[in-house]
Image (cartoon, rainbow, N blue to C red):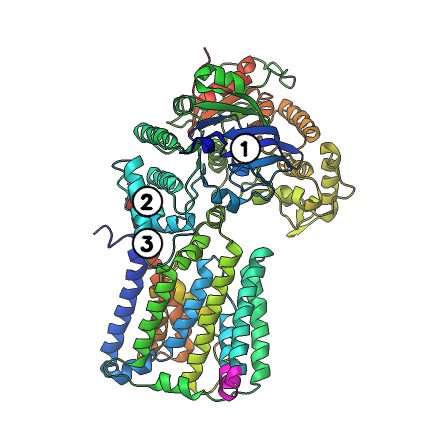
Amino acid sequence: MDTNMSERPVIEITGARKLFGAVKALDGADFAIAPGECVGLVGHNGAGKSTLVNVINGGLGLNEGQITLSSGQVSSDFSIRVARAQGIRCVFQELSLCPNLSVVENMRIAHSGLSGPGWRSQARSMVDELLDKIFPGHGIDSGRAVSELSIAQRQMAEIAIAFSSHGAPTALVILDEPTSSLDASRAEQLIAYVKTFNAAGGAVIFISHILGEVLDVSDRIVVMRDGKVVSDKPSSAFTVGSLVQAMGSVAAESAGRRTVAKRAVSEAPVIAFPRERDAVEFEAFKGELVGLAGLSGHGQTQLIVDLFMSVSGDWWARREPVAAFVAGDRIVDGVFPIWSILLNMTIAVLGRWQRFGLTDRAQEAEYGRTWHEKIGIRTPNLDHPILSLSGGNQQKALFARALGTSAPLVLMDDPMRGVDIGTKQDVYQMLREEADSGRTFIWYSTEMDEVCVCDRVYVFREGRIVRELEGDAVSEENILAASFGERVA
Amino acid sequence: MKTLFSADSLRILVPAFSLAALLAAVFYLQPRTMSYMGLNLMFNLAVPIALATIAQMLIIAVNDLDLSIGAFVSFAACVTATFLESDPLIGLIILAAAVGVYALMGVVIYLRNLPAIVVTLGMSFVWSGLAVLLLPSPGGSAPEWIRAIMTSRPPFVPMAIIASVLIAIVAHLIVMRSSFGVVMRGVGGNSRSVERAGWSVVKVRAMTYALAGTFAVIAGIVLVGLTTAADANIALRYTLLSIAGVILGGGEFVGGRVSPIGAVIGALTLTLAASFLSFLQISPDWQIGVQGAILIIVLAIRLLLNRRERREKRA
C-alpha cells in the first residue's frame, strides 16, 4: 500500500445537510474514513445513521455539504455509480439480494463487469472463495436460489458479495446491522474477517445495535444524534455505558406526562397479550397511553398487527369495533389517495348513516365539520383531495378516522413520522384528552420525545419485549439502555 | 432427492408431467396421432403460441403483464401478409418500428409509474386499429420463405416439435443463462437492489420489452407461415393463452420467477388440451370451459406441492 494513498480518506463528507420535508435528517454532519480503518457508527432512531450511509453509497443527494473522493477531488455529481467506481459497497439492514436468483447470479447483479463467456464459473469461484474465507463451514451452495437459503445463510452470502471485488478494488464496505441474523460464532468470524480486511488496507463502517460488538470491532466510534456527529473518539475511549450516554440528549423536561393515578391491583387490563418470548407480559389498562419503544424494526409493528388481528373479526367486521388502527406509513396503508379529505375521515364509521344501503350525505358532512374543528385540520374545504394536505394534516385526518369510531382501544404504528412539531403538540393534547375520557392508546414511536409522553413503555429488542418502564422510570436513558441491551451502571 | 424436488425443479416437473399425461391420454383415445403427421398437425399451431408465450413471460419476468400481445401478434401477422410479402424492406422497417414502440412502452410504464395492464390494454386497441387499416378483410399472402420453413418436413421429427424445442432452448439461453437475463430477472426479484448496484433499471426494462416485442413479431410471421393469410383478429385469443401458458409452465406473476422451458411446455399443453377435448367429442361450446378447468387443476396441484414444500422447510 502506498503510504501517500493511505493518508487520504476513502471518502470525506463535510457540512452535510439533508432535509426530508420539515425533518432535518442530517444537520451539518462531518464524516471521514481512512483506508485500513474500521469506524463504528451508533445512534438511536432518527439520529441520521441510515441517511449518512445512503449519502455515502450514493443513493441520496445532499441539500448542502461537500463530498471529497479518495483522489482528493471534490465530487459534484456523487451518485451510486460514482460510489461504486470508488469501491464503496454496502450491506443493507434488510435483505437486499434478489431472492429469485442464485448466489452466483446475485454476484452478477453486484458486479456489472462480470459478463461474457465463463462469467458464471468466475463468479462462483470468487464468491465460494470469500465465503470459505469469512465463514468457514458455511454450507451454502452458491448455485441455489437465495430464497431457498436460511436467513443466516442469506446474510452471509450478502456479506461475502459485498466484500468481493471485480474490476474496481473494494475500498470501503458499509455493514448495516450485519449480525442481526447471525449467531455469536458467525458474528465472531465476521469481526475477525473485518480485521484482516482492515489490515489489507480496506475500510469498514460498522453499524450495530449490539454495542459490545461495535466496541470490539472498531478503531474509532462516531456517535450521531439529531443529524449531527456528537462524539468521534477512538473506541478505547468508550465503554458501553458512555456510549449510551453519548447517544441520549440532555434530559429534556417531560412536560407532557402526568403522574398516573395508582391502579387498583384488581383492575383487569383492557387487553393482555402474553407471548412466551417476552420478558415482560404485555398489558394495557383503561385510560392509558402505552408506548412501544426500542430501535425501529425490532418487533413493535408486529405486536401492533398481532394485537389488531386478535381483536378484529376474521371475515365480518364487528359491529362495535374493539380496536382502531392509525397507520404510520400513510401512503402504503393510510390514505385513499384519490378520495377527498371527508371520505378519508368517514370510511371507518360509514355504517352509522346508512339508510337502505345508501349513505346520508348530510350527516356525513356534519360529522366532518365536527372533527374538522375538533382536530384542527388546516384546509378551507373537506372536499379537497386528501393529498392536497401536508403530511401532518393528512395524519390528523387519519386520527379523526380512528378516533371517530367507538373503539376503546387505539393502536398507532409510528403515526408521527415526518410530522412537524406544531401538529405533534396538537396531537399530544388530543391524545391526552381522549385518554382521560377512558380510551386506551398503544403507541409505537421511533421518536424519543413521543415515547417519553407515555404513561408506561415497553422496550423491544430483537422481536421481544425486554423491559417495562413506568412513570418516572420512562426516561431516554433507561430506554436507550434497554434497547441497546445494557444496563447503565 | 432434495434437489430434484426443490422449488425450481418443481417449476419444470409439474408442467412436464401434465403434458406427458395429456399426451398419453390423446394417444390412448386416438392412436393414429402417434405418427409424424399426427404430431405435426396437433402441434403446428402451438409454435406461434409458444413464441407469444415467451414474449408474455419476458414481460411477467419484470413484474408487468401485457394485455396487448394478441392484438400485437395480429398486427405483425397483417404486416407479414401484406408489406413483408410485397416490399420486404418496408415490412421490416414497420416491424422494427413496432419493436421500438414496445421498448418505449416499457420506458413510459416505468418512468411514469403507470400500471402496465392499463397501458398495454390501451395499446391493444391501437394495434388492432392498425391491423384493420392494413387488412380490412381477411387476406394477404405469406412470404414464400416462411411458408417454406413452416411446411418443411425434416426427417424423423416433425417441424412443429423441432421449432418448439428450438424456441425453448433459445429462450432458456437468453433468460436463464445469459448475463443480461440475470439482470432482467433481478429487476423482477428486487428492483431496488439492482438499482443500488448501479444498474439503470429503465434500460433493462426497455430491453426486456424490446425482446418481448421481437418474440411477438416472430410469432406473427410464423403464424402467417402456417395459415398463408392473415386477418386483423387472427391472434386476439393469444393474450389470455400466453398468460395461461406462462402460469401453467411454472411462472409466477411477481418476483421474477419464470421458466422459459416451462412456458413452451405450457403453450404445448394448452394446444393439446384443445385436441384432447375434440377427441373426447366435447362440443366446442364447452371446450373453453374445460380448458379453464384444466388450468385450475394444474395450478391447484402446484399450490399443494409448494405449500407442502414450505411446511417441510419450516419444520
In magenta stretch: residue A68: no
Q: Quadrant of the C terminus of chain A?
A: top left
- Asked if marks 2 and 3 fall on the same chain, the answer is yes
Residue labelled with disc 1: A12
Image coordinates of residue A337 in percent, x first then y, are 64, 48
Image coordinates of residue A209 in percent, x first then y, are 45, 26
Neighbourhood count class around disc 1 (C-alpha, 10 Å): few under 14, some 14–19, many 20 upward:
some
Residue labelled with disc 3: A120
In magenta stretch: residue B86: yes
Precedes in sequence: disc 1 or disc 2: 1
Precedes in sequence: disc 1 or disc 3: 1
Parent chain of label 2: A
Q: Are marks 2 and 3 in contact (CB under 8 Å)?
A: no
In magenta, the rendered stretch is B79-89
Precedes in sequence: disc 2 or disc 3: 3
Q: Nearer the viewer, residue A31 or B77?
A: A31
Q: Quadrant of the N terminus of chain A?
A: top left
| Three-letter amino acid code of the residue under disc 1 | Glu
Magenta stretch, main secondary structure, is helix
